Amino acid sequence: MSQTSAVAPLPLLSRRSQGLRGRVRVPGDKSMSHRALMFGAVALGETTIRGLLEAEDVINTARAMTALGASAVRGPDGVWRVQGVGVAGLRSPAQPLDFGNSGTGVRLAMGLMATTPLTATCVGDASLSRRPMGRVTVPLSAFGARFETAEGGRLPITLHGARNPVPVAYTLPVASAQVKSAVLLAGLNAPGRTTVIEPTPTRDHTERMLKGFGARLAVEHKPDGRHITIEGQHELTAQALDVPGDPSSAAFPMVAALVTAGSEIVIENIMLNPTRTGLIDTLIEMGGSIAIENRRLAGGEEVGDLHVKASRLRGVTVPAVRAPSMIDEYPILSVAASFADGTTRMEGLEELRVKESDRLAAVEAGLAANGVTTRSGRDWLEVDGGGADGRKLGGGTVVTHMDHRIAMSFLVMGFAAASATRVDDSRFIATSFPDFTGLMNGMGAKIEAPDR
């Protein structure tokens, strides 16, 4: 069991704040950080990574790659160096691989291991151990891998990689970049061509980065969706990577500045991949003052700085087609909607039911505890806004269910609510944003430990 689930909870509360000010940088992109470590581990040569997100989820991936025979080490200059072993070079680890709270880490790693003849047991914390893994074990079994799972196909899972893998053609039943990536990574060491058919586009960091490492990968747009094909058993070449800021982490100071009166901030060096900018598009539709400045290219990705000012927001309908580009941002969007005029409706949210928690239920419960009226169904949520002054909001305690995004979202709510908001446990913020409290308080927010 992961160590993070064995220590005492760490409650925090946030209070109404004056205007937030400053120029800040959020941690490196989490999706790119995981992939940089994994792709470097199976490339030939030394991959260098600047700006890696040094949070628990990513550190667990680095440890897992080292346990599998590669080497991932942080130098005194802050640069990570990964010594790769080639696409067929991974070996059985001596101990179980602990992925903590990271669904991305464990699912992509299972893909990476599935077509190599090794045996590995994957474990995680209590939250990760409740999340479904059948969505990756089913397609990976088609390559010839075998899995021994806990009840319901959950962790802990022992994987037996295929000795004689075969290529696969797989159509994604749900829009999931994790499942797509797991299948493509399995295809790296399978002979012939492996194809993933994606009816609804999802974030494409895996495709972009694999191409950067020299993978033979092609993308075609057909009537039934994107066809991503990778030719297996070709070596990757080590790269020098610079990871831009994570748009999912930028979401928290961005919304905080929009809803906290008198705020004006700049969030620097944010990745602007179009498969990740759904929240920015939605907040601008709601009337948010967000200007993208200093656009540029870095490592094959578009990046820029976000200039954000406090704004009067209005309710909108967020279509289901936008969900894959902002699936992790719905908790903080729901907080923004709480301060909007009118009702915000969010559709296509079924994936939130199987995140670190049932995020849809956790968001609703947290909003209700702080005076917000909501309605929901299996895959949709409506939030009735209380207006920009937040005079009826706050005062509740939010059960985070060990979910870092729930904790950060409701701490942001407290900056603009009439009464303080409290979260029951903030430990899991460290999985993605270790200095969240320091960064927010440095701009003028008020996050503190509650009186005992």
Image (cartoon, grey):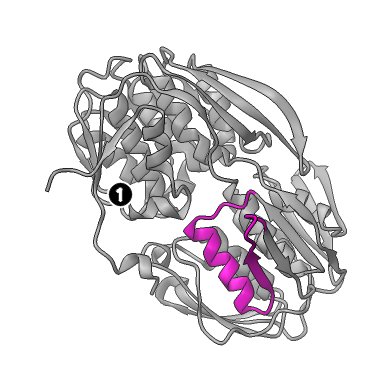
Provide the residue span drawn in magenta: 51-79
- Which residue is nearer to you in this view: 363 or 250? 250
Q: What element carries label 1?
A: loop
| Residue occupied by mark 1 | 400
Name above or below for residue 327 compared with residue 403: above
On screen, residue 49 versus residue 110, left or right, reads: right
Neighbor class of circle 1 (other Cα within 10 Å; few <14, some 14-19, many 20+) is many
Q: Which residue is drawn at 36% across and 20% down?
A: 260
Residue drawn at x 23%, y 44% is 449
Residue 409 found in image quarter: top left
Image quadrant holding the N terminus, namely bottom left
In the rendered structure, which amino acid carries the disc numbered 1? Answer: Thr
Using residue 154 as the reference point, say whether residue 361 is left or right of it: left
Question: Residue 168 versus residue 12: which sits nearer the camera?
Answer: 12
**Front one among 1 and 342:** 1
Q: Which residue appears at 40% of the width and 76% of the height? A: 151
Residue 357 visible somewhere in the drawing:
no
Q: Indicate whether 294 appears above or below 353.
A: above
| Residue 322 coordinates in the image, percent (x, y) | 58, 33
Q: Does the magenta stretch include residue 86?
A: no
Query: Could you tell me residue 304's position as x and y percent?
Result: 67, 29
